Image (cartoon, helix red, strand yellow):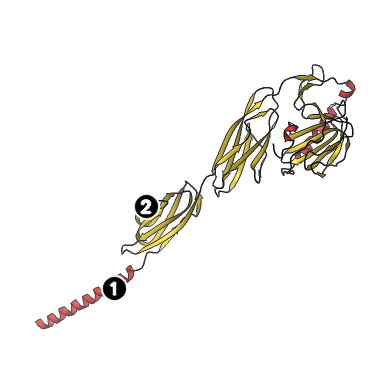
Amino acid sequence: MNSYRRRLGLAVLALAATALAALTIAAAVRDRTPPQLYVEAPLRVAAETPVMVFVSADEPVTYVLSYAGSEQTVVDQDYTFELTAAAGDNVITIVATDAAGNATTVEAPLLGVPAITLDMRALTQVRSADPLGITLTWNDTGAAIQHYWIAVGGTLQNSAFIEGVGAYAVAPMPMTVDPMQLEVVGTVTDEFNRTVEARQTVTLEPLPFTVEQLQLSAQTLSVITPEGRELEANTLAEAWAQSSPERYWTQPFIMPIAGRETSGFADARRYAQGGPVSYHNGLDLAAPTGTPVQATNDGRVMVAGAYPIKGGWVMIDHGFGISSMYFHLSKIDVEVGQRVQRGDLIGEVGSTGLSTGPHLHWEMRVGEVPTSPMVWVDKVLP
């Protein structure tokens, strides 16, 4: 009987040992399987902004996340890490280790796009009524630029990106006899809605206030009528409404004639004794009747015809909000809609309209605002 019990006990022990060995082998097989990981992380973000990295395993693990010199450790199965994006190309490394010591490593690249650095260039002091050129440039960080604005004195200016120059605007300065300062603001927004701003102040040198009393005969003044003013104002408004934002010119502006200056730009004058003071919107250049007049630069003819006050009048749209005008012509050699190039003949000097002798009245305007014509000469951009 004892012998039987001893044999039965040994058999039970043998079965238990076999079962334990089977469990040990199964556990060993299972523990050799590394954890399976699922990771969600962005590829490209704005530098210095929060980044969420979600990781999930098929079992509880110890996560060690390394990124840009920092490290985070947590025990969990599903977890969201919060990082701050470092500038430049970096790699997120996640090591997940299970209870049996099996580890899985996952790497995810992360590009942190730095914010741009903005530079604005413009003169800090200009003469009243001169055009002011403003340039915005920025470093290439890889961030796409969505918008840029240039404002002067709170007024947005027409601006465009010019290859090799930057974002550029020409702002007309007001005619004033009083000292004045205007704030220039440049703003750029990138694809991540980060806005960078640059500011500076421009000081206007006031115009001298010396009023010239013009001695005009009643016959000369008779061309100024309400009907004539309305006709010319409507013609200008229609022309400006059709101006092109595209820049037509690529070469420096030139003088339309080589005449003698008889009346300067922005000169204060009265047409009648005791009458209101007005400023001369252009430059008067005296020359014999019939002197050829050239287009100051490439553009499209917007006005070409005889008018009561301006006389023989040609207006050229140079695009980008810039236009030139030529008054008192005795002959016009272009038509509305015609494309002209710098130096092309557009007409001849005369004394038509409100004029007391043969000369060319030449204007350069930014939008609807007159600017000093001579500032444009020999320059592609003022």
Between 286 and 54, the residue placed more toward the observer is 286
**Would you say 63 lies left or right of 285 here?**
left
Tell me what residue is drawn at x 37 percent, y 60 percent: 96
SS assignment at label 2: strand
Give the label on residue 370, or none: none
The residues bearing labels 2 and 1 have C-alpha atoms spaced at a distance of 35 Å
Mark toward the start of the polypeptide (2 vs 1): 1
Q: Is residue 367 visible?
A: no
| Circle 1: residue type | Ile
**Would you say 206 lies left or right of 4 here?**
right
| Circle 2: residue type | Gln
Which quarter shows the N terminus? bottom left
How dense is the environment of label 1, judged by Cα within 10 Å: few (below 14), some, or many (20 and up)?
Answer: few
Are circles 2 and 1 on residues that touch, CB within 8 Å?
no
Which quarter shows the C terminus? top right
Give the label on residue 72, or none: 2
**Image position of 4 with respect to 349: above or below:** below
* Residue at the extreme top of the image, as rendered: 274
Q: Position of residue 152 (x, y in %)?
A: 63, 33
Q: Position of residue 243 (x, y in %)?
A: 75, 41
SS assignment at label 1: helix
Tally the numbered discs. Answer: 2
* Residue at the extreme left of the image, as rendered: 2
Image quadrant where residue 304 sits: top right
User: Which of labels 2 and 1 is toward the front?
Assistant: 2
Q: Position of residue 39 (x, y in %)?
A: 44, 59
**Image position of 110 with respect to 7: above or below:** above
Image quadrant where residue 177 sits: top right
Identify the residue position indicated by label 1 in the image.
Answer: 25
Q: Position of residue 21 (x, y in %)?
A: 25, 74
**Would you say 334 lies left or right of 36 here?**
right
Between 247 and 32, the residue placed more toward the observer is 247
